[in-house]
Every structure is written in structure tokens, then in C-alpha cells.
Amino acid sequence: MKFENYKTLIVLTFAQCFGQTAAPILVLLGGIVGAQIAPSINWATLPIAIQIAGIAFATIPASYLMSKIGRKAGFLAGTALAIFATLFAAWGIYQESFTLFCIASFLIGNYIAFLQQFRFAVAESVPSEQIAKCLSFLMLAGIVAALLGPEVARRFSIVEGLPDYVGSFLGLTAMLTVSFLILLTFYKNTTFEEQGKSSAVRPLGQIFRQPRLILAIAAAAAGYSIMSLVMTATPLSMHEMDHHSLDDTTRVIQIHILAMYIPSFFSGFLISWFGVRRIIQAGFVLMAICIFIGWGQPEFIDYWGALVFLGVGWNFLFLGGTTLLTQSYRTSERFKVQAVNDFLVFGLQAIGSLSAGVLLASIGWSGVMVFALPLLLLLVPVIFYAGRSTA
């Protein structure tokens, strides 16, 4: 394999190592900061939910923008927006303004919509038989983000002369600046036409009636909505309600994010060996184990175990869904299908995240698990439907 054939993959992986730190930092601190400055504890997780709503809101504009100006300009614009948003978040915390912090969270979500397009840029830059393995490699950037993001948040949470957690978001600003410089210096747009001739665009109705495309979206949506629901609830439940230390809470979030991305060392190969549908089925089983472990009144080890299975289950569902998605559209259809897919996936993720605070405040941690179960079971008929089809 020639280096030039995988330059896009390598550059975007390094850029994502730093850019993806935005998500774990906001997951770790969003609910904690919210609990301190929100008008009510019921609204504590709203910044995280608003961030995910920001992702859903920007998925279609991000895809459309990049179809017009190219991926490099789009990635740079999104990262510049994120740098501004993290400074705005720090200012919101400094002013103890929940409104400003929520606006900043929404803008960070907009950025993550651009970041999610990295996987499509990689898929467009390699042969079709290499897509699953290359996407798996790209997801390894999440390991770096899992270690780096929460560590930056924790180490700079207390800075002399500043309110708590202002320094965490200034540290995130530095991480995003590194990502911006990597993209500016090394990334080049892939000439997609070199990989095959563009075909006529089919009607959206015809495209989205494909059983494999329905399964692709359902798997990614189930994985993201359940993961977001449980992960959003965890820091608030552990630190604010069960009074675990910030260090213990950080360790659980770190191990969860590591569990999300460490399987990428082998999940791409598993897809090649066993097929994408079996990997999606395995993800379903792992999510069910997560709910079983987390049920009831969890101790530290229960949080730890549930979040590990949650992470691995998400990896299988999301990577399987994304791989299947890239097999479901033609070259000329890619931007429209990618935009609709991400809008549905991250829209449902936003619902899961927004529900976390309300469920915790009303019926506690068990309510989170109760709500996660039907979200998972909705995947069952889709798996059977796609399995019966040869489409």
C-alpha cells in the first residue's frame, strides 16, 4: 500500500485526535457546570443536549457547504467556529451565564457535525474494499481524545484567578487550534471523480427504501441515542447525586470513551470476516448487557462495567451502520444521503441526551435504563427485515 493512497486517512486521523477532544470534555463537564450555573438541577444536562441538537442542526448545512466549497474549506470553517465557541463557553462560565454556556455548547455541536464528515472524506479516498478497515483506523483517534480530553479538562479545571472549569475550555481551545493547523498545512481535497464515474441520482424515496440503508441508519441511530442518553446521565448521576469524586467520574468517562474506540483495532477486520450485519447484531447484544449491568442502584464498578459495554456496543453499531451506509448510495448521491443520515442519527441522539437530565431528576438512574431499553428493542424488527432481504 502506498502512503499517498492513505494520506487523507492519516492526516484526518491526526486532526481528529485533537478536534475530537471537544466531545469528551463537554460530556464530562457539561452536566457538572450546568448543575452549578443552571437555574434548576432539572436543566443541568441541557448544555450536552443542546450540543447534540447543534450537531443535528448543522448536519445538512455542513454537507451542503462542503459540496459547494470542498471539504478542506468546510473543515477549516467548522474548526474555526469551534475555537470561537470554546472561548465563548469559557466566557459564559466566567460570567456564570447558563444561557451563554448553552449557546457555546450549540456552536460546539455545529463543529462536531463538520467533524463527523471526516469519515465520509476517508471513505471517498480509498478503494471500496478498504472502507471498513480505514474507518476503523480513523476511529482510533477517539482513543487519544478519550485520554487527552478529560485529562485537559481535569488538570485545568482549577486555575488561579479564574472560576472553576474556565481553564478546561481554554485548554480545549488549544486542542482545536492544533487540529486547525494540521488541516491547514497537510489536508488536501480528494478528487472523487478519480475513484469512479458518477451515476445518475435516484429519487430519495427509492434510495431510502433500501433495507440495508434502513438498517444502516437504524443501527447508528440506536447506538448513538442510547450511548448519549447513558453517557450524558453518568457524570451528573455519579458526581452530583451519588457523590463520587471528580477523579472517579473522570476515570469512568475515560474508560467508556476508550471502550468506544479501542475495538477499532479489530472491528474493521471483524466486518471483513463476519459481515456487517453480524457485527450490528453483536452491537445489539453488547448494548443489552450494558442495560442489564446498569440496572438498579449502581456502585462505582457497576458504572464502570455498564459504560464499557456501552462503548463497545456503540462501536459495533456505529461502524457497522456507517460501513453499510457507504454501500447504499452512488457517488452522485453521497452528499444528500450523508446529510439525511446524520440528521436522523444526531437528531435522535439529541432526544436521548435531552431526556437524561429529566429522567435523572424525576425517577433517577433507573429511569435512564428504562428509557434505553425500548430504544434498543426498536432495532430488532429492522435487523430481521434487512436479514430477509437480498437488497
Image (spheres, rainbow, N blue to C red):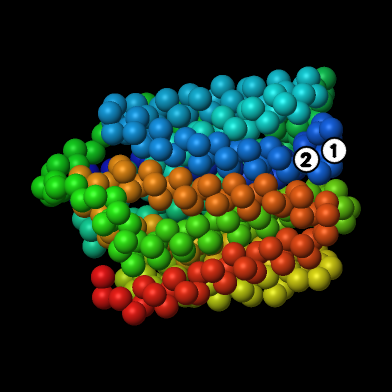
The picture places residue 224, in percent across and down from the top left corner, at 54, 56
Determine the residue positioned at 62% across, 68% down: 374
The picture places residue 95, in percent across and down from the top left corner, at 78, 20
The picture places residue 166, in percent across and down from the top left corner, at 74, 27
Determine the residue positioned at 30% across, 42% down: 335
Determine the residue positioned at 30% across, 63% down: 210
Residue type at numbered disc 1: Ser
Residue type at numbered disc 2: Trp
Q: Residues within 10 Å of mark 2 (few under 14, many from 20)?
A: many
Q: Residues within 10 Å of mark 1 (few under 14, many from 20)?
A: few
Image quadrant where one finds the N terminus: bottom left
Is residue 112 rendered to the left or right of residue 11? right
Is residue 370 rendered to the left or right of residue 24? right
Q: Is residue 169 above or below residue 146?
A: above
Determine the residue positioned at 50% across, 69% down: 379
Is residue 83 rendered to the left or right of residue 196? right
Q: Nearer the viewer, residue 205 or 291?
A: 205
Q: CA distance from mark 2 to mark 1?
A: 6 Å
Residue receiving disc 1:
40
Residue receiving disc 2:
43
Q: How many numbered marks, from 0 up?
A: 2
The picture places residue 130, in percent across and down from the top left corner, at 27, 60
Q: Nearer the viewer, residue 366 or 30?
A: 366
Is residue 125 rendered to the left or right of residue 322? left
Per the image, label 1 sits on a secondary structure element best described as loop
Per the image, label 2 sits on a secondary structure element best described as helix
Q: Are marks 2 and 1 in contact (CB under 8 Å)?
A: yes
Q: Is residue 159 above or below residue 380?
A: above
Q: Is residue 120 above or below residue 70?
A: below
Residue 9 is at least partly visible in this image: no
